[in-house]
Amino acid sequence: MKINVLFFASLRELFEKDSIEIAKPENIKTAQDLLDFYANHEKGPWLELLAKKNTIRLAINHSVVDWDSVINDGDEIAFLPPITGG
C-alpha cells in the first residue's frame, strides 16, 4: 500500500524534497499512527516532524483533517507548517 506525502515550506527544507511515496504498513490506521511509525523506524526528519506536530496542520486528499483521521491506500497526505511572510 502506497501513500503520497507532500511537504511544504520549512518541512520541504527539512526533508530536502517536496514529496515522497511511502509504504503504509498494514497495522497503520491513522495519520498519527503513520507519523509515529516513521518517527520510530526512520528517525531523522520524521522525529523532528513528530516534535513539531502540535504546530503542523494535516491534509488528506486536499481536506484539512485531525491527526486521528483514517488513511487509506493511495491517499495523498500533506503536512502544512505555519507559514509567515510579509
Image (cartoon, rainbow, N blue to C red):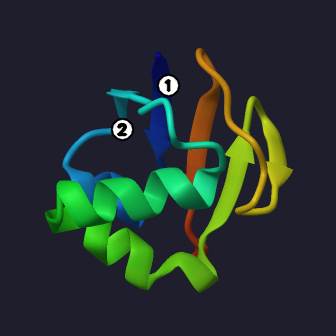
Residue beneath the point at 36% across and 38% down: 18
Q: Which residue does the image show at 82% across and 51% down from the upper left?
A: 64
Q: Nearer the viewer, mark 1 or mark 2?
A: 1
Along the line of sight, which residue is nearer the eye, 59 or 11? 59
Quarter of the view holding residue 61 = top right
Residue in the picture at 26% in, 40% down: 17
* Residue 2 point in image, percent of width and height: 45, 18
Quadrant assignment for the C terminus: bottom right
The part of the image, by quadrant, that contains residue 25 is top left
69 shown above or below 17: below
Out of 43 and 5, give the one closest to the viewer: 43
> Is residue 56 or residue 2 the one in the foreground?
2
Q: Are marks 1 and 2 in contact (CB under 8 Å)?
A: no
Residue 9 visible within the image: no
- Give the total number of marks visible in the rendering: 2
- Type of residue at label 1? Ile
How crowded pointer 1 is (Cα within 10 Å; few <14, some 14-19, many 20+) is rated as some
For marks 1 and 2, the one nearer the N-term is: 1
Cα gap from disc 1 to disc 2, whole angstroms: 14 Å
Q: Is residue 33 visible?
A: yes
Residue 48 point in image, percent of width and height: 30, 76
Instruction: Report the residue marked by disc 1.
Output: 3
In the displayed structure, 20 sits above or below 84; it is: above
Residue nearest the viewer, comparing 37 with 26 = 26
Mark carried by residue 18: 2
Q: Amino acid at mark 2?
A: Asp
Quick check: 77 above or below 73?
below
